[in-house]
C-alpha cells in the first residue's frame, strides 16, 4: 500500500476493505470456487457503485475518481482486492473501460455506461496461447474486408472471457497493430473456460475464427495501436502488481500473527532467530513491492510512456518473483496447516502465483527491460553524434 | 545366522527376475500419472490392488527380504534387497505398504516390540493384511514432536487415550496406528511419553479427511475419545516412549534408503531413469519451450540436483552404516529432499508458464501444464511433512556440527507447566 | 527561520546551474573508472583535488546547503539539496567529503556538539579543511558496536585513550576522528560509553593500512596509546555515549538519502543514468555476450533491482520523514543495499565469465572483465561494512516487526564481566 | 573428501597434507604471489616424488598409484591441494600425462619421463578465448602440410602456459578433432601471461600462428580425437572439482572454528540460530560436493563415457555454484576480517571462484546435461522403434 495516504484516500480504502470483508470473506470464497463467474450477481454491481469500474473513465463518459488520480485510486482498490483475494473482473473491465474512454470516441459511450454500472463485463484480449508469450507476440490477424474487418486468432488466457459481453482484441494488421471491439455474440467467437489455480478468478480461451466486425469496431487508428496497447499493458500491470502486493501484505500479516501466537518448545515461533531473519527478508520484499507499485502507478498515470513501461516491468519482475517466494515462505512458517484448504493462506498464494505467470513472466519482463535499456543506449549514442 | 546359509546374491537376482516376469504386473507404458486427486473409489480400488500385490510377493517368497525369518521374512541382507529393487524396475509394487508401514512402523516394532507383538503383526504386514499409519503429529505440536498432548491414562491392565492426531496419510483406508501419547504430565516432556499400537477403525476414533490446497484429501486428522488400549499393546517402557520415538524418527528420516522397503531403482522402459529431468523435458516440449536456453538451463539444473540428491543419500547412508557418523547425519538427506523437491516444483511451474495457472482441460498437454500450477501450490509439502527443514537445520547445526543448542523454555519443566501459546 | 526568507527552489536551481557551468569541472566522458587500487600518490592527489573542490563550493556559496547559516552553511531545505543534486549531474564533486565527514560525523556534531564545538569544526569541514573519520569499530567487537574496549580514563580536565579502532576508510589522509570509547567498566555496556573528537595525526596514534583481498588499501586500523583528549572535545555526556551513538548509527544507515551530503542523481551524458545495468550491458558487450539471453536476463535483473532499491529508499525516507515509522525502518534500506550490491557483483562476475578470473591485461576490455573477478572477491563488503546485514535483519525483526529480542548474555552485566571469546 | 578411506589412503592423504602444510603454508603463499611460476623450484620436484605427476600414467611408462585407482588417488591429492590452496600445475600436467600414457605411443615415453619426474611441465590447451566457451567450441585449426601439420589458433586460459615446455592442443581438422603435441619452443608460438585471481595459480594465453609440427606430434588418430578429448575433459573436471571441494572444506572448517570462538553480545556466534541454519545449509552443500566428487571420480575412471560426462558436469555445475556461495558466506560470517589479505579465507574463495569460471561455467554444464539427456531420449526412442 502507498505510504502517506490522504484522509480521503484512507476513508476510501477503509470502505473498500470493510465492504470486501463483509461481501467476500474467505468462507464465501470457498463456497464460490465452483461458481462459474466466481462471484454472486449483486456483488459486482455494488462494487461498481463504490467506483470500481469507473475510475479510469473520464467524467464526460460518466466516470471519475476520489482524488482525480484514477489509476492511483484504482491501485488502492486492487491492493484491497489482493488482500481479500476478491473476485471479479477488476483488471479486464478497467483496462477496457480506460481504453474506450480514451480513444473509443462517441460510439463507446453506450458500452461504457454498462461497464461503469457493473451491468456488463468486458475482457482485454491481449495474451496469446503457447508458444506465444504474454508480452506482445501478437499472432491474431485482422484484415480489411469491404468496409469492415475480419479477425482471426486465439487469445488466452482471457480474464473473465466467459462472462464478458465485449472483447477488446489486439491483432496485427497491415502497417502495425489494430484494436477491435468484438461483441461476444458475434459469429465465429468460441469461448472455452480454463481451469484457474485461483479460487475465484476466471479465465477462458477465446477463439476468433473469421469474425466480421464493422469499421466502427476499430479503436483508434488501424495499424497504429501499438502505443495505445502499451498503455493498456502498463495499466493492466499496475492493477496486477497492486493486487499481488495486497496478497503479500495479507499473507505476511497472517504469518507475523501466527509466529507470535504459536509456541514451540515453550517459546513463540517469533523468538527463533532463523525465522526472524526470514521475516526480515520478507518485510524487505514486501516494502519494496509496495514502493514499486507506487512508482509504477505514478509512472503509468504520467505522460512518459518509456518510464511507464520501465517501471511496470521493474514492478512485475520484482513482485512476480518475490510475491510467490514470500507466500511460500509464509506457508513454510505455518507448517502443515498452511497447506490446507481450510486455512486462509492459500488465497494469497494463488493470487501471486497467478500474477507471476500472467501478462509476462518476470523473466520476460527482465528481457523487456534490457531491450528498453539497449534502445535508450542507441538513442543516446545517436543524439551524441 | 552365518552368511554361509544365505542364497548367493546373483542366484537370488536370477530367481527374482524369473519370478517377477511370471507373476508381477508391469507398469503401463508411459508410467502412471501422479494425480493430485483421485476419487475415493479409485483410491480404495488401488489400496485393494496393493494388498493383493503384497500378498503375491508374500506367497511368492519375496516379501520382507530383510525381515527375520521367524516373523515371515526372508532373513536376507540389504544387498539382496538392493538387487531385488533393481529387478523390480518396470514392475508395479505395493507402494502404500512401504512407508510408513514397513518403515518406520514395522521397523519400530522389530526393534522395540515383544516376541508376541512381532508375531501378531509382522507376518500380517508382510501378508498384506495390515496397513499401518503413524499417530505422531498433533494439531498443536508442530515441529515439537515430543510436545504431544494426547493423553493415555492407566486403568488396570488398560490405557485410556484421549486427544487428536494429524497428518496421517490415508488413515481412512489403513488398519493400525502406532501412537505416541503422554502418560505422565508431571515430568519434563521427553520423560512422560509412551508408545501404543491400536486399530484405527474402532468406536472412539473419528477419522476426518483434510483437504489440501491442491485438492488432495489423503491426509487425515483423528479424534480419539476414551479409546481403550490393552497394556500388551504398549511398545517399549512406560514413560520411555521418547527412546522409541527417537529411533522411529530416525527410521522416518532414512526411509528412502531403508532395506526394509521396496524402492525400484528405475521404472518401465527407463522412462524415469533420468529422474525428474525427463519429466521436465517432456513438459518443456509440451510448453513449446524445448529450444529456449532458459528452459534447458532449468532442466539441466533439475537433473544435476537429482543426481546430487542421490549421491548425497548414498554418502550419508554409507557413512552411517560404516559407523563413520551418528544417525543425525541423516538430517542432511532430509534437508536435501525438502530443498530439492521444492526446486523441482518451482522449475515445473516456471517451464509451464501461463498454462500452469490458467489451464486448458480439453487436451492432455493442457492438463500436464495445469498440473504444474496445482503442484506448485503445495511446493512446501516436502519441506514440512515428516519434520520441517527448519528442524533438520537445527539438527545439523546442533547434532552434526556440535553448535550450542537452542534455548528450550520447556527443558526440565514439568510438561503441564509448559507454555504452548494461545 | 520562516520559509518566507528562503530562496525559491527554482531560482536556486537556475543560480546553481549557472554557477556550476562556470566553475565546476565535469566528469570526463565515459565516467571515471572505479579502480580497486590506486597508488598512494594518486590517492593523495585526489584527496587534495577534493579539498579544492569543497573549497570551491564553499567560496561559491554552495557548500552545506542544509547546514545552519551560523556555522557556515546555507540554511536551506532538503528540497534545495535535491535540486542541487540534480544540477550536479555530470560534474565532479568532492565525494570523499560526503561520508563519513558530512554524515554521520558533522551530523552528530550538529546534533550533540556544543556551540563552541560546532563553530570549531563545521565551518572548517564546509571549507574543505577537515576530513573526518569514524573511530567506531574495533578488532574484537564486530557487530556488537557497543562492546568497544578502547578505554578513556579521566585525568583532570583531560581523558587518556588506549585501544584500537579498525575499518576507518582513509584514516591516513584524514584529519579528525569521532571516537566512541569506554569510560566506565562497572556498568552494563551501553551505559559506560562516551564520544570524543580527536586529531588523527598525533603522537600516540599509529595508523596502519589494511590490505583487502581485492588489493585495496583504503581501510586502516589505528592503535591508540595514551592519547590525551581535552574534556572540551567530548561530544554528549560522560557515560552517555550510546545516546550519541544511536543517532550516529542512524545517520550512517541513512547516508544515501541524507540532505547533508551531495549525491548527484546522474553522471555525465547520462552514462550511469540507468544505474549498474548500463555498466553491465557494456560488460556483456565486451564479453561478446550481448546476444545471449541469459546475459540479457541478468542485465534486466540488475536494472530492476537498482530501481527497486531506489524506490525502497524513497519510501523508507518518506515514511520516516513524515513520522509514519521509527528510524529503525532504515534497516530495510541497509539490508537492501547489502543484498543488491552483492547481487550486482555476482552478475558482473557471471557476465565476464572465464576472463574474470584469468584476465588479459594488454587491452582495456581484458582489464574490465578482469576487474569483475577482483570485485567478486569482495562481494560481501557491502553486506558487512557499516553494520552487517545480519544486524539489519535483527533490527527489522525486533525493532520494526516487534518480535522478541535475541538473548544477550551481556545485558545488565557490568561490562568487565562480559565474556568476549578467546 | 571421499568417505571410507582405506588405511593406505588415509596414510597417503595425511602425508600429502603434512607436506603441503610444511612446504606452502599460507604465509609462504602470500610471498609467492608475485613469483612467476607460483612456486619454488624444488617444490614441484618433491611433489613429483610423492607421486603427484605419475598417478594417471601406466606402470610401463613409469607411473602408478597407491591403490591402483590412479584417478581416485589423484582426486585425494587435488582435495588436499584445494584445502591448502597449493600451487603447481597439478591439473594440466596430469591431464597431459594421462593422455600421453594412454594414446601417446612410444614417442611419448621421453616426454612422460620428464613430466613424471617433475622436471617438465605440460599444458592442456583446450579452452579458447571469448566469445568461445570453455566447453569445447574449438576454433583452432590444424591442416596437413606435407608430412606434417600446421596449427593456427589461440588457446586461453592455459594453466601454467608460461611454464610449460609442451602443449597438448586440441584443434579442428578435416573429419573432426585432432590433438597435437607442440613444444613451447616451436616457431609461431606466443605466450602471454594473464592475471589470475588466484594467488599462486598461473594462466596464459597461448597463440599458435602457423606453427609447424611433424606427423609424430599427433596424438591418436587425426580427425577422431573427440572421445579422447572428452576423456581428458572429464579428468580435468574431476581434478578441478576435487580441488574446489577441498577449498570448501577448509573454508568451512575455519568458519566453524571462528563461530565457536568469537563472542558477540556475550554469546558465541555459533549460538545464533540464523547463523546455525546457514551453517547447516553450508554443511549440506559441502557433503553433497564431496559425494559428487566421489561419483564423478569413479565414473571418470570407468568405461562408461556417457556416465563420466554426466557426473563430471553434474559435479561441476553443483560445486561451481555452491563452492563460491559457501566461501562467500564464510566471509560474511567472519565480517571485515574475512575480507583482508592477512586472513586465510580468501585462498579458498579464490580457488573456488577460479574453478567456477574455468573449463565451462555451471550454466554451460547444465546445458550440456540437457543436451546429453536429450540425446539419450532420442536413442531410447530409436531403440524402442
Image (cartoon, coloured by chain):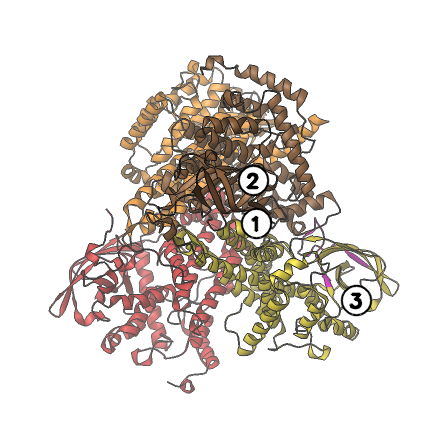
Chain colours: A yellow, B brown, C red, D orange
Q: Chain of mark 3?
A: A
Determine crowd level at label 2: few under 14, some 14-19, many 20+ residues with C-alpha closer than 10 A.
many
Percent coordinates x, y for residue A78 in the rendering: 61, 66
Q: Tell me the magenta residue range.
A: A123-142
Q: Which residue is mark 2?
A: B200
Q: Is residue A246 left or right of residue D253?
A: right
Q: CA distance from mark 2 to mark 3?
A: 68 Å
Q: Say if residue D235 shows up in the picture.
A: no
Q: Position of residue C5 (x, y in %)?
A: 40, 86
Residue A133 within the magenta-colored segment of the rendering: yes
Q: Chain of mark 2?
A: B
The quadrant of the image that shows the N terminus of chain C is: bottom left
The foreground one among A9 and C72 is A9
Give the secondary structure at mark 3.
Answer: strand
Residue at image position (60%, 16%) is: B15
Do the residues at pointers 2 and 1 share their chain? no
Q: Is residue C72 left or right of residue B262?
A: left
Q: Return the residue found at the far right.
A: A146
The chain that hosts pointer 1 is C
Distance from the alpha carbon under mark 2 to that under mark 1: 64 Å
Q: Main secondary structure of the magenta part?
A: loop
Residue beneath disc 1: C290
Residue C420 visible: yes
Badge 1, how many Cα within 10 Å: few under 14, some, many 20+?
Answer: many
- Is B129 positioned to the left or the right of D180 in the image? right
| In the foreground, C418 or A367 | C418
Q: Is residue D84 magenta?
A: no
Q: Which mark is residue D339?
A: none
Asked whether the residues under the numbered discs 2 and 1 touch, taking CB atoms below 8 Å apart as contact, a structural biologist would say no
Amino acid at each position: 500500500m502507498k505510504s502517506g495516504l490522504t484522509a480521503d484516500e484512507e476513508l476510501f480504502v477503509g470502505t473498500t476493505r470493510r465492504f470486501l470483508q463483509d461481501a467476500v470473506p474467505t468462507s464465501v470464497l470457498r463456497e464460490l470456487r465452483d461458481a462459474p463467474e466466481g462471484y454472486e450477481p449483486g456483488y459486482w454491481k455494488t462494487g461498481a457503485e463504490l467506483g470500481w469500474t469507473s475510475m479510469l473513465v473520464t467524467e464526460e463518459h460518466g466516470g471519475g475518481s476520489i482524488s482525480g488520480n484514477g489509476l492511483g485510486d484504482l491501485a488502492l482498490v486492487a491492493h484491497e482486492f489482493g488482500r481479500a483475494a476478491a473476485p471479479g473482473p477488476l483488471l479486464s473491465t478497467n483496462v477496457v473501460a480506460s481504453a474506450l474512454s480514451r480513444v473509443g470516441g462517441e460510439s463507446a459511450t453506450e458500452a461504457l455506461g454498462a461497464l461503469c454500472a457493473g451491468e456488463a463485463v468486458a475482457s482485454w484480449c491481449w495474451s496469446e496461447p503457447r508458444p506465444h508469450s504474454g508480452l506482445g507476440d501478437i499472432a491474431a490477424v485482422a484484415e480489411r474486408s469491404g468496409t469492415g474487418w475480419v479477425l482471426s486468432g486465439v487469445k488466452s488466457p482471457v480474464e473473465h472471457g466467459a462472462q464478458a459481453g465485449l472483447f477488446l482484441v489486439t491483432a496485427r494488421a497491415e502497417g502495425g497493430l489494430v484494436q477491435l471491439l468484438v461483441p461476444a455474440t458475434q459469429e465465429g467467437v468460441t469461448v472455452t473456460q480454463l481451469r484457474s489455480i485461483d479460487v475465484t478468478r476466471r479465465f477462458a480461451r477465446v477463439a476468433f475464427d473469421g469474425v466480421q466486425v464493422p469499421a466502427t469496431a476499430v479503436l483508434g487508428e488501424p495499424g497504429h495501436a501499438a502505443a495505445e496497447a502499451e498503455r493498456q499493458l502498463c495499466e493492466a500491470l499496475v492493477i496486477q502488481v497492486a493486487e499481488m502486493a495486497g496478497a503479500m501484505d495479507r499473507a505476511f500479516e497472517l504469518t507475523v500473527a501466527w509466529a507470535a501466537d504459536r509456541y514451540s518448545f515453550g517459546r513463540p515461533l517469533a523468538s527463533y532467530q532463523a525465522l526472524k531473519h526470514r521475516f526480515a527478508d520478507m518485510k524487505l520484499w514486501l516494502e519494496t513491492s509496495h514502493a514499486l507499485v507506487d512508482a509504477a502507478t505514478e509512472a503509468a498515470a504520467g505522460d512518459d510512456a518509456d518510464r511507464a513501461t520501465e517501471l511496470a516491468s521493474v514492478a512485475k519482475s520484482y513482485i512476480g518473483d518475490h510475491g510467490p517466494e514470500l507466500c511460500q515462505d509464509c506457508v513454510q512458517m505455518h507448517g502443515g496447516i498452511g497447506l490446507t484448504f481450510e486455512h486462509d493462506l492459500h488465497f494469497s498464494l494463488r493470487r501471486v502465483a497467478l500474477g507471476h505467470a500472467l501478462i509476462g513472466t518476470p523473466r520476460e519482463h527482465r528481457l523487456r527491460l534490457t531491450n528498453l535499456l539497449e534502445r535508450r543506449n542507441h538513442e543516446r549514442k545517436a543524439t551524441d553524434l | 545366522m552365518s552368511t554361509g546359509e544365505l542364497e548367493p546374491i546373483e542366484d537370488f537376482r536370477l530367481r527374482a527376475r524369473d519370478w517377477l516376469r511370471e507373476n508381477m504386473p508391469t507398469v503401463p507404458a508411459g508410467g502412471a500419472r501422479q494425480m493430485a486427486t483421485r476419487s475415493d473409489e479409485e483410491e480404495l480400488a488401488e489400496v485393494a490392488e496393493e494388498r493383493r500385490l503384497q500378498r503375491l510377493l508374500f506367497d511368492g517368497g519375496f516379501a520382507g527380504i530383510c525381515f527375520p525369518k521367524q516373523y515371515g521374512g526372508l532373513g536376507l541382507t540389504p544387498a539382496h534387497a538392493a538387487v531385488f529393487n533393481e529387478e523390480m524396475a518396470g514392475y508395479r509394487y505395493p507402494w502404500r505398504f512401504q512407508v510408513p508401514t514397513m518403515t518406520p512402523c514395522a521397523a519400530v516394532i522389530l526393534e522395540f516390540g515383544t516376541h508376541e507383538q512381532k508375531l501378531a503383526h509382522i507376518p500380517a504386514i508382510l501378508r498384506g493384511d495390515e496397513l499401518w499409519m503413524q499417530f505422531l503429529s498433533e494439531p498443536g505440536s508442530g515441529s515439537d514432536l515430543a510436545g504431544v498432548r494426547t493423553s493415555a491414562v492407566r486403568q488396570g491392565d488398560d490405557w485410556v487415550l484421549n486427544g487428536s492426531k494429524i497428518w496421517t496419510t490415508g488413515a481412512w483406508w489403513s488398519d493400525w496406528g502406532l501412537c505416541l501419547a503422554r502418560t505422565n504430565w508431571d515430568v519434563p516432556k521427553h520423560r512422560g511419553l509412551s508408545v501404543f499400537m491400536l486399530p484405527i477403525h474402532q468406536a472412539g476414533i473419528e477419522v476426518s479427511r483434510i483437504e489440501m490446497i491442491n485438492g488432495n484429501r489423503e491426509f487425515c486428522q483423528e479424534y480419539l475419545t476414551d479409546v481403550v488400549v490393552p497394556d500388551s499393546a504398549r511398545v517399549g517402557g512406560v514413560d520411555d516412549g521418547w527412546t522409541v520415538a527417537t529411533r522411529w524418527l530416525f527410521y522416518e528420516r532414512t526411509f528412502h534408503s531403508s532395506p526394509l522397503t521396496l524402492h525400484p531403482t528405475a521404472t518401465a522402459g527407463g522412462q524415469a531413469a533420468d529422474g525428474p529431468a525427463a519429466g521436465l523435458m517432456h513438459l518443456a516440449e509440451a510448453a513449446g519451450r524445448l529450444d529456449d536456453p532458459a528452459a534447458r538451463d532449468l532442466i539441466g539444473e533439475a537433473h544435476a540436483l537429482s543426481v546430487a540428491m542421490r549421491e548425497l543419500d548414498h554418502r550419508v547412508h554409507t557413512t552411517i552404516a560404516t559407523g563413520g557418523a551418528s544417525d543425525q547425519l541423516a538430517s542432511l538427506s532430509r534437508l536435501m529432499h525438502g530443498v530439492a523437491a521444492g526446486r523441482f516444483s518451482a522449475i515445473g511451474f516456471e517451464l509451464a508458464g501461463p498454462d500452469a495457472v490458467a489451464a486448458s482441460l480439453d487436451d492432455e498437454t493442457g492438463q500436464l501444464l495445469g498440473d504444474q500450477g496445482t503442484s506448485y501450490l503445495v511446493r512446501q509439502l516436502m519441506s514440512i511433512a515428516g519434520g520441517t527443514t527448519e528442524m533438520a537445520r537445527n539438527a545439523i547445526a546442533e547434532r552434526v556440527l556440535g553448535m550450542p543448542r537452542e534455548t528450550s523454555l520447556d527443558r526440565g519443566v514439568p510438561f503441564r507447566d509448559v507454555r504452548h501459546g494461545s
